[in-house]
Image: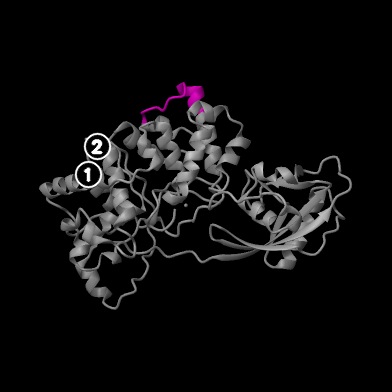
């Protein structure tokens, strides 16, 4: 029996932007804290018919995604981790590149972390790559390089949460585990005209219970993927394509003429403005880098030495303090030579780059020196890459950006469960794959 998803604490539902909210509430099903719903139940024969229609539609219309070509649990696992908070179209080239570099668990386990981070570079949420590497080493060490088919054993691996464990078990091993992400929640909310969102405990319990009853015990993996496919391709957040929907006949949101009102949106966190001062330190043909950006961001990647502030002046003052801590108390920085804007989860960052030249080094500086000509091959962050592209002395080098960075999700009702860390934080509007709880960038 699949273990139920852990509930999240309820939050105050967002207001619907409609004039006749009272009438909508009367016509809709409301799931209170207990998860009980009015009228969302379907007759057993309807559930069987709905399930059959959904699976038949999926067999005919499933997109030929590269991770669907193999039932290998390793390939399923890698795809699920990459799809956390990241859109399908963005993931495909990264997935193919990653599997070419590390075709098996053993290949990944034996690779240096620096190479894994380089291959992952540009996809964001870099803690996911570190966890993949650690989990691969544990699989080789404790399970002879094969994936266990036990929920608790899979959960014991670094970085694997409830959602990813369920995905591997249902898709790779056809075990009866349900998968609940924003896409699935949206489909079920509209089917039952159920108000609320996944961050409300009653709504989540109601959807979990319905999903458990609907799950195909014969084809749990295909059933889970079919529901997600429906949410990603037809049952879209703002403009659902109801005419092509295989379960339209059972959809109460459609019959009420307002499927787009379900589920309710989650209140969004306002963007925060930050200033960052970065030091571009030369020593001959080499440039200085440090691990991390500060404030717990990008800890796994190389960055130009930098510091945050509430203003441009404060960021520069903080940078001077950081350089002093690194062994350069009187280093002269020149005027800014580049300005870039960058986003990390809810942060909107304005970056100024200040050049400086170092003639001699202290015994312990905490800096790592990279040949400018080799920066493209280094595991540097997207922010460092973006800064380098704006510096004239670097432009002679083919500092090509990694494939388009992932677009971060705004609400869980549209993506994969959040990753557990990385160059960002928890998936994007309704057309991605799934999600596991995560923080970062």
Which residue sits at x=70%, y=49%? 397
Disc 2 or 1, which lies upstream in sequence?
1
| Residues packed near mark 1 inside 10 Å, few (<14), some (14 to 19) or many (20 plus) | many
Give the residue at mark 2: 219
Q: Calculate the distance from the C-alpha at mark 2 to the C-alpha at mark 1.
A: 9 Å
Q: Position of residue 437 (x, y in %)?
A: 45, 48
Is 272 situated above or below 393? Answer: below
The residue furthest bottom is: 19
- Magenta residue span: 137-150
Is 356 situated above or below 212? Answer: below
Is 210 situated above or below 189? Answer: above
**Which structural element holds mark 2?**
loop
Q: Say if the magenta span includes residue 226.
A: no
**Which structural element holds mark 1?**
helix
Classify residue 136 as left or right of residue 40: right
Residue 55: which disc? 1
Q: Nearer the viewer, mark 2 or mark 1?
A: 1
Tag 2–tag 1 contact (CB < 8 Å):
yes
Q: Nearer the viewer, residue 91 or 145?
A: 91
Q: Nearer the viewer, residue 156 or 231?
A: 231
């Amino acid at each position: 029996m699949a273990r139920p998803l852990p509930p999240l604490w309820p939050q105050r539902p967002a207001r619907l932007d409609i004039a006749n909210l009272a009438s909508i509430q009367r016509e809709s099903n409301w799931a209170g804290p207990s998860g009980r719903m009015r009228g969302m139940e379907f007759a057993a024969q309807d559930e069987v018919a709905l399930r059959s229609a959904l699976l038949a539609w999926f067999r005919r219309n499933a997109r030929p995604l590269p991770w669907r070509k193999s039932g290998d649990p390793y390939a399923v696992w890698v795809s699920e981790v990459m799809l956390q908070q990241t859109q399908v179209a963005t993931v495909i080239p990264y997935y193919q590149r990653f599997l070419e570099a590390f075709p098996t668990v053993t290949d990944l386990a034996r690779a240096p972390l620096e190479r894994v981070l380089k291959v992952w570079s540009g996809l964001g949420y870099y803690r996911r790559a570190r966890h993949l590497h650690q989990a691969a080493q544990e699989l080789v060490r404790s399970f002879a390089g094969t994936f266990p088919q036990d929920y608790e054993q899979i959960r014991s691996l670094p970085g694997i949460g409830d959602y990813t464990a369920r995905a591997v078990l249902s898709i790779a091993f056809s075990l009866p585990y349900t998968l609940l992400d924003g896409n699935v929640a949206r489909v079920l909310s509209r089917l039952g005209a159920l108000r609320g969102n996944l961050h409300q405990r009653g709504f989540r319990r109601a959807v979990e219970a319905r999903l458990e009853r609907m799950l195909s015990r014969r084809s749990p993996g295909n059933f889970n993927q079919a529901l997600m496919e429906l949410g990603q391709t037809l049952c879209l957040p703002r403009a659902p394509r109801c005419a092509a929907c295989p379960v339209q006949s059972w959809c109460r949101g459609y019959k009420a003429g307002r499927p787009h009102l379900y589920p309710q949106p989650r209140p969004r966190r306002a963007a925060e403005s930050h200033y960052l001062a970065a030091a571009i330190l030369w020593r001959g043909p080499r440039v200085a880098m440090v691990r991390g950006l500060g404030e717990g961001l990008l800890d796994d990647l190389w960055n130009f030495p930098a510091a945050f502030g509430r203003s441009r002046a404060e960021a520069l003052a903080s940078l001077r303090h950081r350089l002093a801590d690194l062994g350069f108390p009187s280093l002269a920085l020149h005027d800014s030579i580049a300005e870039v804007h960058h986003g990390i989860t809810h942060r909107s960052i304005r970056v100024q780059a200040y050049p400086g030249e170092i003639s001699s080094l202290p015994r312990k500086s905490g800096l790592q020196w990279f040949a400018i000509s080799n920066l493209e091959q280094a595991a540097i962050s997207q922010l460092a890459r973006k800064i380098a592209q704006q510096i004239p002395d670097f432009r002679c080098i083919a500092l090509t950006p990694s494939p388009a960075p992932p677009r971060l999700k705004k609400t869980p009702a549209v993506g994969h469960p959040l990753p557990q860390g990385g160059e960002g934080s928890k998936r994007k509007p309704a057309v991605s794959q799934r999600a596991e709880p995560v923080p970062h960038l």
